[in-house]
């Protein structure tokens, strides 16, 4: 019998958070529990019709059945640049400053391979998207955890990073509006980050997956809107959350030419780009009119209001999200985050995500995703109240 041992980088992986939750969920469903699943950040609303229609037409074209270009169709990259100009008033060269991605997760996971040598440090916010530290470790790098604390408005304290770490740091991940805390960054934060990046020669990788998922007409800014940003970094975007396209697997990276080109080198050796029909449908997505998007936003806003007011009323401590579809609530003092998630699942069939799953500094919190209709959200609040 052959004995196939996993590589150390796989053996040393922390258990993938959502796999553990999936297991709990399956067990609950097998027991016949009427589960209200608020655990995963995957929109329940379908992709808008005009995008699906564009896909149907695109898939019929034989030209799209062949290998796509590595960096993405020029027409897709032009549509990205045009979207950026309209939304953020940022000019991008579609030929050198835009790269297609097979979802932004793919680019985030691969960027350390382009710039991080074994032993180099990557500055990683925590709690945060698990791909930042894992991508770092796959490249042989060392994640240095920047805790996001409520008393610092969930911003990293850059001044607390030791100088020996800064000397070894190649890259920093940031994510605003933030998953899981739903915090947004104040304007002076990005200015400070750019100064910091220049001083320490660190590449900034800003994950802007939630830039379009905002409330009260309060539009988040792009990192690239700030002077000097393009000299120090790139921004990752996803069509997943903005257009309810998580299953389509498309995103993009934009910004610093050298960084975009480095990431492109990794990708051209690993993958062969995004199905062109998906790129063509995504051009239609990027041209979506404001009314379609504001309809989607108002659905989330109603849910946010119901869940926020509800949880507040029953005594949980949390901030009202100005963006993202997450609520980040303190767990009651008697529980740790995993204990509270199990308690809610067992007592009332409501599934949240334990804060600790996003990194140790997330301990003490639970994340709820607004991915159920408002009636189910109200029902969830009622059930949680009884379980408390
Ligand atoms: C959902 C999400 C992404 C996007 O993933 P895709 O691969 O584009 O679907 C990226 N970053 C964060 C923080 C997310 O929550």
Image (tube, rainbow, N blue to C red):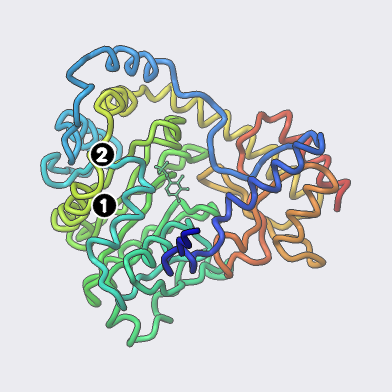
In three-dimensional space, the C-alpha distance between marks 2 and 1, rounded to whole angstroms, equals 10 Å
Looking at the picture, does residue 146 appear above or below residue 105?
below
Res 66 → quadrant: top left
Looking at the picture, does residue 193 appear above or below residue 169?
above
Label count reads: 2
Residue shown at the point (38%, 74%) measured from the top left: 142
| Disc on the earlier residue, 2 or 1 | 2
| Relative horizontal placement of residue 195, taking residue 296 as reference (left or right) | left
Looking at the picture, does residue 1 appear above or below residue 95?
below
* Neighbourhood count class around disc 2 (C-alpha, 10 Å): few under 14, some 14–19, many 20 upward: some
In the current view of this chain or complex, which residue is farthest to the right?
386
Residue 84 got which mark?
Answer: 2
Can I make out residue 251 in this image? yes
* Neighbourhood count class around disc 1 (C-alpha, 10 Å): few under 14, some 14–19, many 20 upward: many
Instruction: Work out whether residue 223 or residue 264 is closer to the camera in this orientation and state it.
Output: 264
Whole-percent x, y for residue 370 in the image: 61, 39
Q: Quickly name the residue at label 1.
A: 224
Whole-percent x, y for residue 375 in the image: 73, 28
In the current view of this chain or complex, which residue is farthest to the front?
1
Question: Mark 1: which secondary structure?
Answer: helix
| Relative horizontal placement of residue 148, taking residue 135 as reference (left or right) | right
Question: Mark 2: which secondary structure?
Answer: helix
Whole-percent x, y for residue 88 in the image: 28, 42
Residue shown at the point (44%, 20%) measured from the top left: 48
For disc 1, does the CB lie below 8 Å from ligand 1?
no
Residue shown at the point (83%, 40%) measured from the top left: 382
| Relative horizontal placement of residue 144, taking residue 14 as reference (left or right) | left
């Amino acid at each position: 019998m052959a004995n196939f041992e996993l590589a150390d980088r796989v053996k040393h992986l922390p258990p993938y958070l959502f796999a553990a939750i999936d297991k709990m969920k399956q067990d609950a469903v097998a027991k016949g529990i009427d589960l209200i699943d608020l655990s995963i950040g995957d929109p329940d609303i379908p992709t808008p019709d005009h995008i699906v229609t564009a896909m149907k037409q695109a898939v019929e074209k034989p030209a799209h059945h062949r290998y796509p270009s590595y960096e993405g169709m020029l027409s897709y990259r032009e549509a990205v640049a045009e979207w950026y100009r309209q939304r953020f008033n940022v000019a991008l060269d579609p030929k050198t400053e835009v790269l297609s991605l097979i979802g932004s997760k793919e680019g985030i996971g691969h960027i350390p391979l382009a710039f991080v040598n074994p032993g180099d440090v990557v500055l990683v916010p925590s709690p945060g998207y698990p791909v930042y530290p894992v991508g770092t470790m796959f490249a042989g790098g060392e994640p240095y955890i920047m805790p996001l604390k409520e008393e610092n408005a969930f911003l990293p304290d850059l001044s607390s990073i030791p100088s020996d770490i800064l000397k070894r740091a190649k890259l920093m991940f940031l994510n605003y509006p933030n998953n899981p805390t739903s915090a947004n960054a104040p304007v002076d934060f990005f200015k400070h980050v750019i100064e910091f990046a220049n001083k320490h020669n660190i590449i900034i990788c800003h994950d802007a997956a939630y830039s379009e998922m905002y409330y009260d007409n309060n539009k988040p800014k792009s990192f690239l809107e700030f002077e000097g940003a393009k000299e120090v970094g790139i921004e990752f975007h996803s069509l997943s959350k903005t257009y309810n396209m998580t299953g389509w697997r498309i995103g993009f990276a934009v910004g610093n030419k050298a960084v975009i080109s480095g990431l492109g080198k990794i990708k051209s050796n690993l993958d062969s780009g995004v199905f062109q029909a998906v790129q063509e449908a995504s051009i239609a997505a990027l041209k979506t009119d404001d009314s379609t998007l504001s309809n989607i936003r108002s659905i989330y806003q109603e849910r946010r209001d119901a869940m926020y007011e509800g949880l507040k009323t029953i005594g949980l401590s949390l901030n009202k999200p100005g963006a993202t579809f997450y609520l980040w609530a303190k767990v009651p003092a008697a529980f740790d985050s995993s204990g509270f998630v199990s308690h809610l699942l067992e007592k009332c069939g409501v599934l949240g995500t334990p804060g600790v799953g996003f990194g140790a500094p997330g301990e003490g919190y639970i994340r709820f995703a607004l991915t159920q209709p408002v009636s189910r959200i109200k029902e969830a609040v009622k059930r949680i109240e009884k379980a408390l």
